Amino acid sequence: MITTLLVANRGEIARRIFRTARRMGLATVAVYSDADTQAPHMREADQAVRLGPAAAQESYLSVERVLAAAAASGADAIHPGYGFLSENAEFAEAVMAAGFVWVGPPPAAIRAMGLKDAAKALMIEAGVPVTPGYHGENQDADHLAAQAEQIGYPVLIKAVAGGGGKGMRKVERPADFAEALGAARREAAAAFGDDRVLLETYVARPRHIEVQVFGDSHGQVVHLFERDCSLQRRHQKVIEEAPAPGMSPEVREAVCAAAVRAAQAVDYVGAGTVEFIADASEGLRADRIWFMEMNTRLQVEHPVTEAVTGQDLVEWQLRVAAGEPLPLTQDQITLTGWAMEARLYAENPAAGFLPSIGDLEHFVLPDTVRVDTGVEAGGTVSPHYDPMIAKLIAHGASRQVAARRLADACAQVQVWPVRTNAGFLVRCLEDPDFRRGEIDTGFIAARQDRLTEAAEPSARVLSAAAQGLLSQAPASASEPSDPWGVLTGFRLNAIRQSHLRLYQEGQAVEAPLDDGPLSADVLLDASGAIVVFEAGEAYAFSGTPPASVAGEGPAGDGAVIAPMPGKVVAVAVKAGDAVTRGQTLVTLEAMKMEHALAAAFDGVVESVSVAAGDQVSEGAVLARLTQAS
């Protein structure tokens, strides 16, 4: 029996697991780093134990510190969550060797599925179809380039030990292979401590289909149907749904049976996800769906499976870890309705999806759908961890109902001054092609401009901003309610003012005045900005022109600025180099991803201020360009 559960994770992951543990009557233990001293997950547990500094390697990824925390707290079981140490076989072994119950699959299964090349060889033996490609041991760059030529371009480079899109690059032509290989290896080494890669043929119109499987220690393995995770950006999932659009009963049976065979091949116990890539150019066909990898843990997107099956997958995990048989047999598991999940990221789509960090001065999420989040108003989005700050999950009788409910929920998101992708999510969910189920992993890239660019502020937004500005106008010192103090633009005998000039991102706009009450969607920011929320977007206005509008200087001076704290992983240029607009200059690693900083114009590199390996702060000048003459 499990009585006290330590969750070796943070944020929404820990909170999600605590929720089920409490319902089952278990005591809970949180762990935290110095970056999470005020995090909700540590306050919600019965106990909280400090692990160490903010850096994950010294806290959440430290096996010794997690085990010490478990021993100090009196926990008898450890749940790794998803991410961090959840797919670390050595951690699983250490947990069990120390006498704790491990809430996860056997270490042997983790190892078997942890390396993509070995896993694919195992799947071939088990009769599970795999994607054509090169899965060999030879990691010589020239050999890999030759293999790519043999496979045929485009090819996909993937980290052998990878997951979550890290260490993955699509390569369109031979001339780009070496650079893409280097980037994939660096990212893989940073994320997994292993820079080995494999190559796969790139499927022209791929769909990402995955199957939730579950095994117990009594030899039983079942599936809980499939999910579609095709809406991705840079191989990171954005919107997931269950079931998969266009999935016939015959294809579902074939894919789910293959997933069960995959789990049985490694004597799987616990929750796992078998991921497939489908060539959807002719719809979903059983002979055009191939095994990609198996994630030996619970997935971020597990709530959509919970919604359509009515099962609590964390409860299943805890019961199986305690030695119980699976709660249901295969024929008892049913599929009802449709569910969708959207990942709310702290990032700015209009700025190339750069992560956004800082204090959450204003943080309002909808109450109309299930929301799993690890932060709250007054908290901080740290540069140390993943930029996902919440998941929104909607369920309905049909795909159209679920999509509409989720779009409406994303439209209600209000976050400031941290930027989010809420408006982007609304546009994805309302896209006519998405509503028709015409999706693949290239969906977002093919519609980049229309999905990432926020609409111009509506008349309602402008009017609300004008009202907000007037409400901030200073009254006279002698009489705070003096009407003379709020008559912006007042002239004797003048026609009543109908518009007010505001400034949005340096541009002047005329906002209509309205005598109605101040909208609840207006935030009067402490810095003096007026922020209006609409359709998931945050529109910020000022009553005074910025320096660049007032003619006090140019908008930029050629400086290449670090948009966030991070580590420089590559410098592609040196002083004196001629560069073209869009050319990568410096690559920065932050929030678990690489970010390429490019030239804003054609010019010459005047100076480079950093080298690979340097840690830089937000706003640091990394390089400087001069305009080409």
Image (cartoon, grey):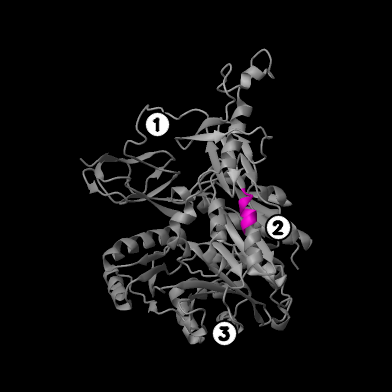
In this view, 352 is above or below 548: below
Question: The residue under label 3 is which amino acid type?
Answer: Ala
Could you tell which of marks 3 and 1 lies nearer the N-terminus? 3
Q: Mark 1 packing: few (<14 Cα in 10 Å), some, or many (20+)?
A: few
Magenta residues, dominant SS class:
helix
Q: Distance from label 2 to label 1 (Cα)?
A: 50 Å
- Residue occupying the point 34% across, 64% down: 181
Identify the image quadrant of residue 253: bottom right
Q: Farthest residue to the right: give it.
A: 25
Q: Distance from label 3 to label 1 (Cα)?
A: 61 Å
- Point out residue 326 in the picture as x, y percentages from the top left corner: 71, 77
Nearer to me, 571 or 86:
571
Q: Is residue 600 left or right of residue 257?
A: left
- Point out residue 623 in the picture as x, y percentages from the top left corner: 31, 41
In this view, 577 is above or below 392: above
Q: Answer yes or no: is residue 68 visible.
A: no
Nearer to me, 558 or 63:
558
Question: The residue under label 2 is which amino acid type?
Answer: Phe
Could you tell which of marks 2 and 3 lies nearer the N-terminus? 2
- Residue occupying the point 63% across, 28% down: 471
- Point out residue 385 in the picture as x, y percentages from the top left corner: 53, 51
Q: Which mark, by number, is residue 18?
A: 2
Question: Between tags 2 and 1, which lies in front?
Answer: 1
Say which element carries label 3.
Answer: helix
Q: Which mark, by number, is residue 254?
A: 3
Say which element carries label 1.
Answer: loop
Q: Is residue 521 left or right of residue 556?
A: right
Which stretch is magenta?
407-413
For disc 1, the marked residue is: 548
Nearer to me, 618 or 460:
460
Q: Distance from label 2 to label 3 (Cα)?
A: 35 Å
